[in-house]
Image (tube, helix red, strand yellow):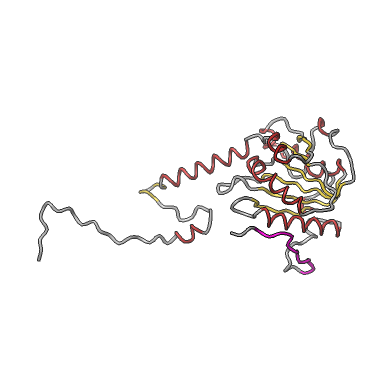
Amino acid sequence: MVEKSAGNPPDHTTTPTIDPWAKLRAATSARIGLGRAGDAMRTRDVLDFQLAHACARDAVHTPLDTAALQAALAPRETILVQADVDSRGTYLRRPDLGRRLSPDCTNVLQKGDWDVVFVIADGLSSTAVQVHAAPFLQQVITLLPGWRIAPVVIATQARVALGDDIGERIGAKLCALLVGERPGLTAADSLGVYLTYDPKRGRRDSERNCISNIHGGGLSYATAADKLTWLMSEARSRKLTGVALKDDPLLPGAAVPTPLSADPPG
């Protein structure tokens, strides 16, 4: 038997612990299986949470850079409007005011004969609109040859229903409103699209189709653009949107969407 001398360091060799949550954590951006340091959360998890919370607040409160957005959409014609809201605080407290145009903007929309008007609305995440709206819209428009597309309307302090007011005034058969969705603690830059046939003030939410979660960790531009342009074609043909227009081919009576483009590899 070999005896260890008093000067030898203690043997701290231990069997590595397998993290049972590692595989699940790698498959989701949700905060699951967070570790602890004593009785508290680990510092890195606390800092990650605080960063996500700060990004969400910034997404809500940072003003949309309309000049940069117009430049990104050039040379396509754009029109700037604002909802009937005097401040961001009012916007958050009074959703009803974000659903109607400011009186100062009602005369800038000239009525025409358009198949669709695209409205880009800051909504609850200017971050989502700043990052995704222009490249996504440009991809959508390439899939709409022959459509009469109105000038793009950029709306600030806007809620979804503002598209009804805009669509009616500009004379479009369809309104596709791109809007920054309410940020969460896993995605502060999620873009949504609301499609309404025959937009006019007083439309109900049940009369719209929604495509949600367009961002780097959600729907790709190509997938969302295919879905939107298919819905637009069906809406124009059937003269309706909302709960009566299904995009799920498994549902009775639903048409099977034909892909118009493919997602890039990887």
**Image coordinates for residue 6, horizontal then vertical, percent:** 11, 53
- Using residue 234 as the reference point, say whether residue 45 is left or right of it: left
Residue at the image position 77 percent from the left and 53 percent from the top: 208
| 34 is within the stretch colored magenta | no
Instruction: Look at the image and tell me in which quarter the C terminus lies.
Output: bottom right
Is residue 254 found inside the magenta-colored segment of the image? yes
Q: How many labels does the image show?
A: 0
Which residue is more in the foreground, 61 or 147?
A: 147
The quadrant in which residue 64 appears is top right
**Residue 122 image-quadrant placement:** top right
For this rendering, which residue is in front, 197 or 68?
68
Q: What residue is drawn where x is 41% and y is 47%?
A: 42
Quarter of the image with the N terminus in it:
bottom left
Residue 231 image offset from top left, x and y in percent: 78, 57
Counting from the top left corner in percent of width and height, residue 190 is at 63, 48
Which sits in the foreground, 254 or 144? 144
Q: Which residue is drawn at 85% across and 45% down?
A: 200
Residue 166 against residue 22 in the figure, above or below:
above
200 displayed left or right of 264: right
User: Residue 198 vs residue 131: left or right?
Assistant: right
Give the overall secondary structure of the magenta segment.
Answer: loop
**Start-end of magenta stretch:** 252-263
Position of residue 26 measured from the top left corner of the image (x, y, whole percent): 49, 58
